[in-house]
Image: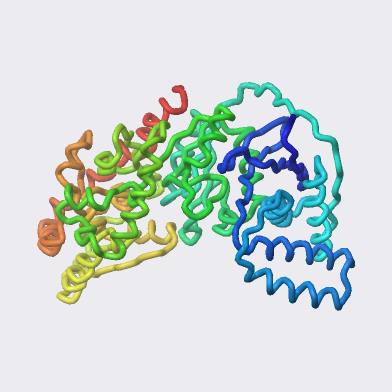
Amino acid sequence: MTQPDLRVVAGAQTIVLRPSATRESSKELVDGALVVHVPMRHPQVGDRHKVALLELKADLAHGRVGRAGQLLRRAWLKVLKLDPRPSGSKAQQLELTFGGLIDRLQPDVVYAQDPAMLAVASRAADRAKLQKRTLKVVAEEASASQAKATPPRERRLLIGPVNSAGQAWLWANALEQVVPTETLSTTAAKYEFPAHRIATAEQYKSDLRWQYDLAAYVLAEVSHVLFEAGRPLFGQLPGQLWTSEVPSLDKAGIKHGVIFHGSEIRDPARHRELFAYSPFQDPQDDFTQRLQAAHDALRRHLATYEGPVFVTTPDLLEFVDNGTWLPLTVDVDALASDRPVLEREVPVVLHAPSSSALKGSAYVDPVLAELDARGLIKYQRVEGVRHTELAALVKDADIVVDQLTLGSYGVLACEAMAAGRVTVGHVADRVRAKLPTELPIAEATPSDLGTVIERLISERETARKLADSGAAYVRELHDGRRAVAALLPFLGGK
């Protein structure tokens, strides 16, 4: 006997809301409908008040209660709000679990299979009247729903939901001739990185229609998924990570992996052991503690995850067992600059950290400001600007200072090298040893940054040769071909 459910029709999309047999939610595609197994609400203090409030709204919409009745019911609501007893009836649990979902989905039709579900749907229809919406409710007999045989699907990859520094978009472009690839971005809209699918943070966190539409599309059309930064694709509740969606993808036969970009997987405690200038030297620092707590929570999920794990910078291989380096990718041709390097008497030195705390800006700023005050350089400091604006600044600079504390190099350094700029940063020996060729980044630390910059200015011909070799390095490792090679085994080869 099948479990009673609510079949919600919103536009052309059919969503089946069904009580979950476990405390976990899951999604699957059955006969073209997205079936969502929803954990039932366990009785809690205040539930009687919430159910009574929903019922009052329904009665008001239907005109079943007069003015005097309204006053009495509202007084009773105040009493129930302070009621210390949990509410545990099955009807109340169904109302709490599904009533709000229907209200948020705003469907056109709801099909209910048993009296209890019909009552939930009917009250939702009454509440819809308050919003001047029409919700049709249909009672239908329960019937066993058999899943159709899933036809083999063509390869299609979805990467998201972060598109950090536009990397997912650039990987998608690099993969264009191999596997159709889409990107999903729900963050960092201010940087205006392009993506195939863009959602607001509010949609990602609370818009059920958006979440369910995306889930239905992915389960029906996508063959491979890469989660970014350990975040789920179909929306995120507080504390929820990518592993919550793995059972649904497994059931649909969708292969999956996870990509880590940096601070989410970089263990602060281990980092300060391995890297002399780590920004996490003080374990009691509030920023460090927050990153440590988030990392530890993610690590617990990673311990049982069986899919492939990719990291975007070579230093992160220190923090992920059996990780695969997925090289950062930049548009080498778009970044090419014909502006000569170090020909101005007072060279322009740019520092544009994505995170001041992580990139060591507290060391960079005073040193470069002092050199600026002496007239040796023109210090250009920016943060939080659109990517197109930043790319123009990089191409116009003579020297770009990346970071001094993480011990590796990131997107800004790659873009600076691609533009033929002199690139400065701290890349630890243990990280340089992992690279297949010599890295043309001038080494600097918090203790010698000023000396390094002055030497580059005084030895300009040597500095220009370093800048010239940057574009060739990026074209060899970071133009997208190495990223495609890293992903091909996951995608099933050519």
Which of the 4 image quarters holds residue 79? bottom right
Residue 354 in view, yes or no:
yes
Which of the 4 image quarters holds residue 203? bottom right
User: Is residue 320 or residue 477 the one in the foreground?
Assistant: 320
| Residue 292 left/right relative to 43 | left
The furthest residue to the front: 85
| Residue 435 left/right relative to 209 | left
User: Is residue 66 or residue 267 the one in the foreground?
Assistant: 66
Q: Which quarter of the figure is the N terminus placed in?
A: top right
User: Is residue 468 or residue 331 the one in the foreground?
Assistant: 331
Residue 352 in view, yes or no:
no
| Residue 138 left/right relative to 146 | right
Which of the 4 image quarters holds residue 13? top right
Image position, residue 303 (x, y; %):
36, 37
Image position, residue 27 (x, y; %):
61, 38
User: Is residue 208 or residue 26 the one in the foreground?
Assistant: 26
Residue at x 81% of width, y 56% of height: 123
Image position, residue 380 (x, y; %):
29, 68
Please name the colour scheme applied to the rendered image: rainbow
| Residue 456 left/right relative to 259 | left
Residue at x 71% of width, y 54% of height: 92
Residue at x 41% of width, y 64% of height: 385
